Amino acid sequence: MNEIYKDKLEILRQRIPIGLRHGLTLLEKADGNIEKAEEYFRDEMVVLTLDKRQVTSDIALRHLEKNNFDIHLTIKSIDEELYTLTELILRKYKNKKEVALEIIMHAIEETKAIERKFWLNFEDLKKLPDEVFCLLTVMEWLNYESYENLDAALSFELEIVTKQLENKLALPDLANSLLRASEIKRLTYEKNESGKGIENYIKAINQFLEHKEYEKCENTYQQQRPLLIDRLYELVTKNIDKFP
């Protein structure tokens, strides 16, 4: 180590978080001027920050000082100032739409202090903005369908969900297909008197699942599910101010 700068390097490192080699380089560049070396360091860190985020030098420096010149924490701090929670989630998971929607859903539950008993109570959500209500109810229904199956999901808040599909997401064919599947299920179960014993119930289930029109409805759902995710994602991005 250059003995001329040894004491000055110690002082410099007390002022800013810098390694020995980097500190010595800056002192040599500043001809031993500690204040100038510190200024060079700050300028370097601002340039690094501006390379990652398009903000003013003043904003970059403010966040750098706030986070002890840790670049990772500085970028996170800047993002939290510039973007809402929903925007941050969308940016982080821009290539994973369904994952983003799930995380936004949980963010809403947390920020709105929504309580759930395993599944959400849709009645508790009616005071929310229409777009938020749509996201929560449709995503919850999709989660229910994934956890159980489509057969079971036809009995889970289907009327509310199909109204969202038709009115908010412009998917009338999907809504009608699910409602028709539900009607086929009801008629099949009534025909076999499914409530009168386990054998009747099993017979009803088998007939329903093998029903050709139900299979067509199920295929429609599977084919349009990716489009449904796209429409929900679009709903969020176009109404970002309604979300956390």
Image (spheres, rainbow, N blue to C red):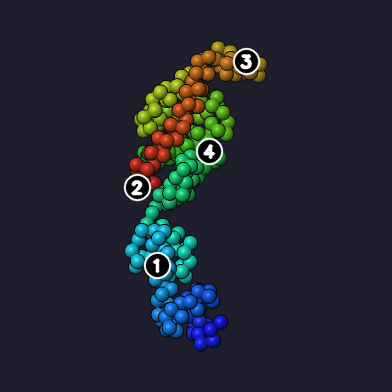
Toward the viewer: 117 or 222? 222
Residue at image position (42%, 69%) is 44
Q: CA distance from mark 3 to mark 2?
A: 50 Å
Indicate which label's residue lies in the foreground, 1 or 3. Answer: 1
Indicate which label's residue lies in the foreground, 2 or 4. Answer: 2
- Quarter of the image with the N terminus in it: bottom right
Disc number at residue 46?
1
Q: CA distance from mark 2 to mark 4?
A: 26 Å
Q: CA distance from mark 4 to mark 3?
A: 29 Å
Instruction: State which tag comes first along the sequence, 2 or 4.
Output: 4
Q: CA distance from mark 1 to mark 3?
A: 71 Å
Disc 1 + disc 4, Cβ < 8 Å: no
Query: Circle 2 is placed at which residue position?
Result: 241
Query: Circle 3 is placed at which residue position?
Result: 203
Q: Secondary structure at mark 2?
A: helix
Above or below: residue 207 compared with residue 4: above
Disc 4 + disc 3, Cβ < 8 Å: no
Residue at image position (43%, 51%) is 88
**Three-letter amino acid code at the position of disc 4:** Trp
